[in-house]
Image (cartoon, rainbow, N blue to C red):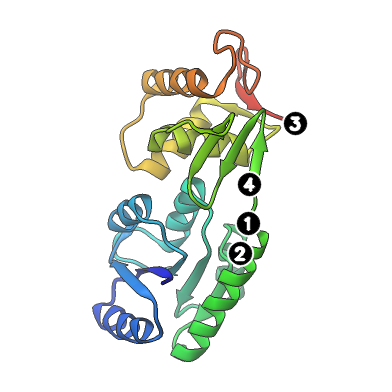
């Protein structure tokens, strides 16, 4: 059974949509704002996210960005705003489809299934310096063993992976992690987590070959 996360602050829409999707064979969870959405997403293995852009608590664009940093999963924006700027912004941030309200439920389900099929076809294990990163399941393997990364360690690795070849400053890393986790992460905490991550993924953490320090600037992964 496919799992759906609905992020929408209109209770009547959530109720109607949940009832319809369950009748179509989906399992549904709902969040009414940014914090609840990110907490559910982090702890759940969803197959697709239906995400409203205008929320009383946060907005869909920032939620989409944060989710994609945690784990790549199909995201469909639902919005009463169908203007070109909103559509382009949503797709640029990584959304997989965009449906304007009001929508026909059966059309929505059809597009959900199309997006999930396309996503499954494109899913692959990402390799990095001897690591195998299963972005669908959020698991990192080395020598066929699960490294058991913590949620923040995994998010940090994904930030590096999604910016492969770029030098990331400490300020940029702090901004990414803060947005994704919703937790307080300061400069000292970042140092601790980079060390913990290196201890798990590097053959020789004292002479790292995956997360390279660029002195006076920040860090870099890959080319």
Q: Nearer the viewer, mark 1 or mark 3?
A: 1
Q: Nearer the viewer, mark 2 or mark 4?
A: 4
Identify the residue shown where x is 48% and y is 45%.
Answer: 138
The image's mark for residue 123 is 1
Q: Is residue 221 shown left or right of residue 61?
A: right
Q: At which x and y percent is residue 139?
A: 49, 42
Sequence-first disc among 2 and 3: 2
Q: At which x and y percent is residue 71?
A: 49, 50
**Residue 82 appearing in the image:** no
Sequence-first disc among 2 and 4: 2
The image's mark for residue 125 is 4
Residues under labels 2 and 1: Cα distance?
Answer: 6 Å
Residue of label 2:
119
Please rate how many residues cluster around mark 4, counting C-alpha atoms within 10 Å: few if below 14, some from 14 to 19, many from 20: few
- Foreground residue among 209 and 179: 209
Disc 2 + disc 3, Cβ < 8 Å? no
Q: Residue furthest top?
A: 206
Residues under labels 1 and 4: Cα distance?
Answer: 7 Å
Q: Nearer the viewer, mark 3 or mark 4?
A: 4
Q: At which x and y percent is residue 186?
A: 36, 25
Where, by quadrant of the figure, is residue 32 drawn?
A: bottom left
Where, by quadrant of the figure, is residue 215 drawn?
A: top right
Disc 2 + disc 4, Cβ < 8 Å? no
Disc 1 + disc 3, Cβ < 8 Å? no
| Viewport quadrant of the N terminus | bottom left
Classify 210 as above or below 55.
above
């Amino acid at each position: 059974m496919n799992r759906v996360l609905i992020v929408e602050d209109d209770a009547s829409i959530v109720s109607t949509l949940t009832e319809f999707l369950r009748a179509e064979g989906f399992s549904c969870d709902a969040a009414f704002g940014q914090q609840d959405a990110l907490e559910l997403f982090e702890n759940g293995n969803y197959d697709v996210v239906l995400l409203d852009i205008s929320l009383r608590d946060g907005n869909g664009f920032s939620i989409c960005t944060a989710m994609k940093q945690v784990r790549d999963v199909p995201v469909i924006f639902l919005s009463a705003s169908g203007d070109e700027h909103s559509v382009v912004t949503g797709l640029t941030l990584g959304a997989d489809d965009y449906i304007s309200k009001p929508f026909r439920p059966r059309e929505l389900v059809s597009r959900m299934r199309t997006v999930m099929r396309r996503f499954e076809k494109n899913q692959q294990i990402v390799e990095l310096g001897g690591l195998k990163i299963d972005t669908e399941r959020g698991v990192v393997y080395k020598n066929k063993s699960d490294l058991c990364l913590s949620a923040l360690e995994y998010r940090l690795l994904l930030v590096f992976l999604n910016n492969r070849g770029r030098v990331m400053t400490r300020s940029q890393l702090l901004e990414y992690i803060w947005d994704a986790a919703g937790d307080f992460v300061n400069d000292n905490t970042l140092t601790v987590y980079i060390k913990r991550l290196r201890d798990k993924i590097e053959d020789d953490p004292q002479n790292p070959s995956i997360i390279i320090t660029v002195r006076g600037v920040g860090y870099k992964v890959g080319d």
